[in-house]
Amino acid sequence: MAAFFSRSSRALPYVTGAAVLGAGATFYASRPRIQLDSAQNAPTPALSFPSSMPFPKQLTVLSTEQVNHDTKKITFSLPGGDSQVSGVPFGSAILTSHWPKDGWFPVFRPYTPISAPDDRGVLQLLVKQYPNGRASSYLHSLTPGSTLSTRGPIPAYTWQRSTTPRELVLIAGGAGITPIYSMARGILSDPEDQTRLQLFWGVNNTRDIVLKRELEELEQQYSSRLQVTYCVSGSEEADLSEPGKYKKGYISSEGLKEAITRAKAGSWGDAKGTKVFICGPPAMQEAIAGKKGWLGGDYGLVKKEIHAF
């Protein structure tokens, strides 16, 4: 039997190979040509819930940019390159994980991408490094070529566009700007959506306004639908000469009163009745949107009218 396979079958690979090549040539000549821009070749999502939760996807660092003293913008390539988009809905987060050196358990942290869900081939994170922050310090250590394990997306708020004018108030504190910015851009980029946004962002100093250029571009492009106010609480001697743009101090009840008064003059709230979206440090969220916060006490909003990321 061994002699049979060693002798009589020597020609088999050549015959089989020729047959395969011939069939391949016939198939290639007869098959329809693939159109790269056709609907059949639309980009696929790299991440999708719940299928991407049990098994992580590896993202590769393309570049890093030091935005200010403690924040980096990290650009990752998706596993499928330009044939994929992240698929992370605006306002939603991904779950990053890594094994710390000599650690017994992995470290998981959610981050909201600042790239658009339909950006081909890439996903961007804006990461603030905290003192002794295990996840943020690890992400800041990544260099081009490094990989990061990600799961998700983690479902957040399911947005419904409004084809009639509606008013919303968005509130961010510090690094809490990422889901707020993501949501604002997602709403504004829909040409059929008529929602108008008033965004308040509380920062320590003007150097902490790490998405200033991006927000200014949105304001210029959607001037009738977006108004941004920066509340600067630090002691720096900054040029706060634009009272409509910059306010000195923390986000306050008095500061929100004007925005809420304007919102009440129109149709305040989205199709679900949500009127305010907020993300920031726990103390800020408690003061503004907690049980005894301003939104409930001064303005009578109930829990279902406030979405906290």
Image (spheres, rainbow, N blue to C red):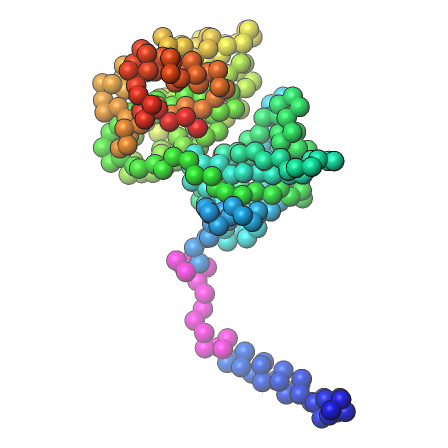
Q: Residue at image x 47%, y 21%?
A: 280
Give the number of callouts: 0
Please give the range of residues in magenta. Answer: 27-40
- Looking at the figure, which quarter contains the C terminus? top left
Residue 307 visible from this viewpoint: yes
In the rendered view, tell whether residue 51 sits above or below residue 261.
below
Please say if 62 is above or below 268: below
Residue at 64% in and 38% down: 106
Which residue is nearer to you in this view: 204 or 293? 293
Residue 107 is left or right of residue 38, and the answer is right
- Judge by depth and name the residue closer to the eye, 207 or 255: 255
Q: Position of residue 22 (x, y in %)?
A: 56, 83
- Establish if 166 lies above or below 230: below
Is-magenta flag for residue 31? yes
In terms of image quadrants, where is residue 181? top left
Residue 188 image position (x, y, % from top left) = 36, 33
Residue at the far front in the pictured view: 104
Q: Residue at x 63, y 88 (%)?
A: 15
Q: Position of residue 58 (x, y in %)?
A: 60, 47
Tell me the quadrant of the picture where the N terminus can be found.
bottom right
